Amino acid sequence: MAEREKILEVRDLSISFKTTAGNVNAIRGVNLDLYRGETVAIVGESGSGKSVTAKAAMGILAKNGQVNSGSIKFTYTREDGEKVSCDILKMQKKEIREHINGKRIAMVFQDPMTSLNPLMTIGKQIMEGMIWHYKTPKEEAYKKAVKLLELVGITDAEKRMKNYPHQLSGGMRQRVVIAIALACNPELLICDEPTTALDVTIQAKILELIRNIQKKTGISVIYITHDLGVVAKVADYVNVMYAGKIVEKGSIDEIFYDPKHPYTWGLLSAMPDLNTADSRLFTIPGSPPNLQKPVCGDAFAPRNKYALKIDSRVEPPMFKISDSHFAATWLLHPLAPKVEMPEELKKRIIRMKEEAAV
Ligand SMILES: Nc1ncnc2c1ncn2[C@@H]1O[C@H](COP(=O)(O)OP(=O)(O)OP(=O)(O)O)[C@@H](O)[C@H]1O
Ligand SMILES: [Mg+2]
């Protein structure tokens, strides 16, 4: 196997937001790696810090946001073929706009309407970035835009070039947003809940599209979702986030078949299961901590029925399970009592394995 090349390396990232009610410590020491041509998912409950992490990597933090520590090293290939590394957090806004945003890192958001200009034809919107970033001649940009529309599965591409966003369905609009994102051949695509606003069938098609594009173009992808159910369809690796930290990371198989963190157990148990008659969905009891206050020990402890005494005092480190699998829970300490995942989840994992084997 060829050596994996790291494209993004986030280290010890801490971000807080100033609000009238005080400082919100939204990101509390995130480490994340992404290799070229691979897809990592970031999953976690609402408010866990997924979008803030992604926005930091794009250099588009909100004005009241403040980076307290860390680095975001991004390695890209310059036009002359040279590999260049930069720390997004050390760059000027202008530099990011000119060299990174939309050019080498592109982002797809949940609601396509927020990223589309209602007053401009979709053709113009796809061509815009190429003309601005690369001074691509108009005719060439037009041809490429048509090709991109075809790539994202829009039929009658030439005709569609003249359409305005409101003339398209929600699923089509999201395809257009993906075409715009791909227009400048970015090396990293960040998708933040790109299918949440779409219905289930369209959602599946968009997921398939992202996966296909990834395979075809070799682009690296960060896929953000609160729904573990979609993760296995798009990602190679998973980062599970809670209260501004990554608490478990591993390959798809490690997270789905051998999860170690009780929070991951909760997320897996909360996935809708089409195969059981029981339609009552499990939800993790309680709610996330208030990040305006300092967190003492393991942030998940108050909601964790397997919590140990030490959890309320000392934050667990990332324990290593394999070269790619890590989890921050004291349950993995050699001296911790043996605790197994809930019976229900065990059965469910056996079912998932059986389904995957078919
Ligand atoms: N501009 C801001 N000002 C104040 N607090 C903010 C700001 N942006 C984000 N936060 C806070 O940071 C935390 C993380 O937010 P983030 O948007 O990253 O969550 P998320 O995991 O993307 O959630 P969701 O699944 O709902 O999109 C939350 O507590 C949120 O309230
Ligand atoms: Mg979000």
Image (spheres, rainbow, N blue to C red):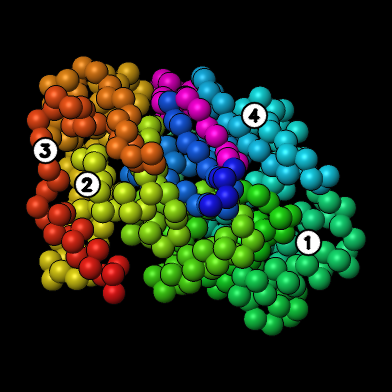
Of pointers 4 and 1, the one earlier in the residue sequence: 4
x, y (%) of residue 15?
A: 48, 26
What separation in Å lies between label 2 and label 3 (alpha carbons)?
12 Å
x, y (%) of residue 198?
A: 45, 66
Which mark is drawn over residue 300? Answer: none
What separation in Å lies between label 3 and label 1 (alpha carbons)?
56 Å
Which mark is drawn over residue 265? Answer: 2
Location of mark 1 (residue) = 127
Question: Quick one: SS at disc 3?
Answer: loop
Of pointers 2 and 1, the one earlier in the residue sequence: 1
Question: Quick one: SS at disc 4?
Answer: strand
Q: Can residue 201 be found in the magenta stretch?
A: no
- Amino acid at circle 3: Val
- Amino acid at circle 2: Trp
Which of the two discs, 4 and 1, sits closer to the camera?
4
Q: Quadrant of residue 72?
A: top right
Q: Badges 4 and 2: C-beta atoms under 8 Å apart?
A: no
Quarter of the image with the C terminus in it: bottom left
- Amino acid at circle 1: Met
Which mark is drawn over residue 87? Answer: 4
Of pointers 4 and 2, the one earlier in the residue sequence: 4
